Amino acid sequence: MKQSTSPQFVQLRADGVHVIVETLAEGLPRILHWGRDLGDLSDLDICTLYRTGGREQVTHLAGDGVAVGILPSPADDWLWTPGVTGHRSGADFSPAFTAAASEWAVIDDPVVAHRLTTTATAEDEGLALRLELELTRSGLLRMRAEVSNTGAGTFDLSSVDLTLPVPNVATELMDMTGRHLRERALQRRDLTIGTHLRESRRASGHEASVVTTVGTPGFGFRHGEVWAMHVGWSGNTRLFVERTNTGVTLLGGGELLLAGEVRLAQGESYRTPWIYGATGRGLDEMAGRFHQFLRSRPQHPSTPRPVTLNVWEAVYFNHDVDRLVALAKTAAAVGVERYVLDDGWFRHRRDDSAGLGDWYVDETVWPDGLGPLVTAVHTHGMQFGLWFEPEMISPDSDLARAHPEWIMAAGHRLPRPQRHQQVLNLTIPEAYTYIRDRISALVTEYDIDYIKWDHNRALVEAGDRTSRRPKVHEQTLAVYRLLGELKAAHPDLEIESCASGGGRIDLGIMAHADRVWASDCIDPLERQLIETGTSLLLPPELVGSHVASPVSHSTGRAHDLDLRAGTAFFSHMGIEWDLLSASAAERTQLARWVAAHKQHRDLLHHGTVVHADLVPDGLSVHGTVAEDAARAIYAVTCLRSPAVLPFGRVRLPGLAPWRRYRVRPLPPGDATDGNISYGSPAWWADGVELSGYVLSHLGVQMPALRPEHRVLVQAEAV
């Protein structure tokens, strides 16, 4: 480990990313460059490029010529969003931090390449600060801050937002929006002067901008320069882009703290979540930095992701042991490797109006317990999973009647109910212990391999009923601790984060979960958009995508099996369909898709995710390319009726330009009967051999697909 104390300039370089930080004897570090690798630079080179890191002053107005640090401050004449806000009984509202020391280390670690740590004090205001800045081996920049109260009395901390500078060539903004059943839709606008603020008070809910991106005009998946930020936190968050009339552009973010949520007594500290920054040539390279980071972690799933059957849309609350056992037998026959029993197995849970918190097997439905089903599942060679919603409580439950004080509320009144449920206050030690012990006991009793961990209610007025203080921050930490303790007690247990389907998708929860449920909407057409947005943060093996029923539960649309299965094929594949109602022909075709997924999932779950930019009208093209670029699989989907037929050539991105590839349709995604308007191109039967350069820049003709149909093609180096 190479260390340097208080250097003037620190250079962090990894995977084509270069970060130049100026550390100051007085004041906090400033990032002078965050972007492409500039090569070997001496301190003289940096001084020549940036002088002292300041900017030319053209007026005498406040803020003009200010060099902005990671934690901007009014004490430095910064009059836009400040890094730290708070007060001590109305005083000490503008802390001026003076750096005490900075230490830079080159890390011998599979995840982190460089770490810069700075300690500082604001003596007049009685505060201390510790800043951590890390560059991962994937070129992902992350940072966090810890603020401590060293003065007498209580310091009320209102916000801590960390920022990263963006060059002025970034003039276009893209973030995400959405709702339940239509999450992470991308939206664009010009990046104008002002503050573009996105706050989420739903614990990283469905409408949250999971990744906010700025870039050069017209940036896409494969072109343009982009800079993006993500807040790795499962509570309330804020992300903003700030462009000033003095030429400064910043990406900023942090936890959104409720009024009075963090009150630091003398000696107490608050630490922010990790704030992540990713840059690259196009969205694919930017997203790839998140993907590589996640894959490099020691806790990243190392075994093949088991094909999963979830029984929710097959039975809903109508639990019948014989039917569920028959469903397990049928699932095993088509190649399912994990069987998940969803909502409805515990006491009083005949619909969604009661029972949450009563985590005991319902004796009226399961007189012999879950044992007969678990035995059947294991006998057929499958893992067994079980649904929980541990953070919630039904007012109509034995638990709520015994402990009404465990319900989160702003005071004596209860928040308005949602889905007949309230939030269980896990910051109360007795409530926390009850939930942990009940889940752990069931995992042990039934040899549970997997938990589907749901979270169906927003944390509205989420406070402690006795103290009347907000508790979203502490509740989030309690959930992390609960997940960690369960994993420690049951090392082989895997957990899915399913927050009302599509919520709470962030790198905070991914430190504890093994996959997410991308959306309750598994209409394969809607999933094209949902999973594209999700892919900007998460690699496909962490994203649950299931084969829907012939008629979608959420949209009422009907789609053929090849589109439904071909959509789930690339991710952590599963099935959400009553297979007992499927025909023999449908089960046979589904088994072909499951077998193909197993055959190719090593590539799909370890390769580089790519998307084509220049595609014919009505088409979507995405795929996965092996790390050594020797193989690739692409999906070509017709989203809507095109204005022009035939489509024209389709480009296949990500291939090595100097290699030659044989391109062929990939069974069972090669089917064209009923899927195309007229015959397939001449090469479809035997394949075609071309260079990676030609395939990436010119492409090949594809079948003239009908709307809402897709084909798969593979490219193999020859």
Image (tube, rainbow, N blue to C red):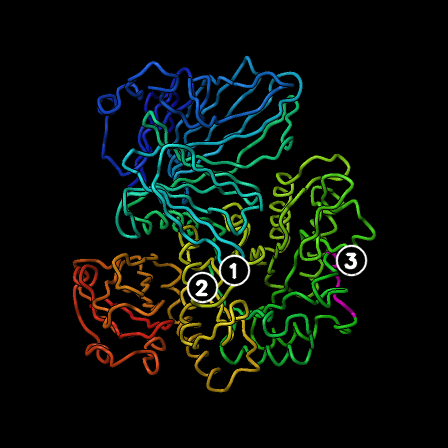
Q: Which residues are magenta?
A: 357-363
Where's residue 256, x and y in %? 55, 37
**Circle 2 SS class:** helix
Query: 613 or 446, which lies in front?
Result: 613
Cα distance between the residues tagged 3 and 1: 27 Å
Q: Quadrant of residue 671?
A: bottom left
Residue type at numbered disc 1? Leu
Residue on which disc 2 sits: 526
Q: Please name which of the two marks, 3 or 1, marks the residue nearer to the observer.
A: 1
Judged from the image, the secondary structure of the residue bearing numbered disc 1 is loop
Q: Are marks 1 and 2 in contact (CB under 8 Å)?
A: yes
> Could you tell me how far apart the alpha carbons at marks 1 and 2 are, in whole angstroms?
8 Å
Dot 3 or dot 2, earlier in sequence: 3
Question: Which residue is identified by label 1?
Answer: 181
Q: Which residue is mark 3?
A: 396
Depicted 614 relative to depicted 405: above or below: below
Could you tell me how far apart the alpha carbons at marks 3 and 2 are, in whole angstroms?
A: 35 Å
Q: Residues within 10 Å of mark 1 (few under 14, many from 20)?
A: many
Q: Is residue 696 left or right of residue 478?
A: left
Main SS category, magenta section? loop
Task: Report if residue 359 lies within the magenta region.
Answer: yes
Quadrant in which the C terminus is drawn: bottom left
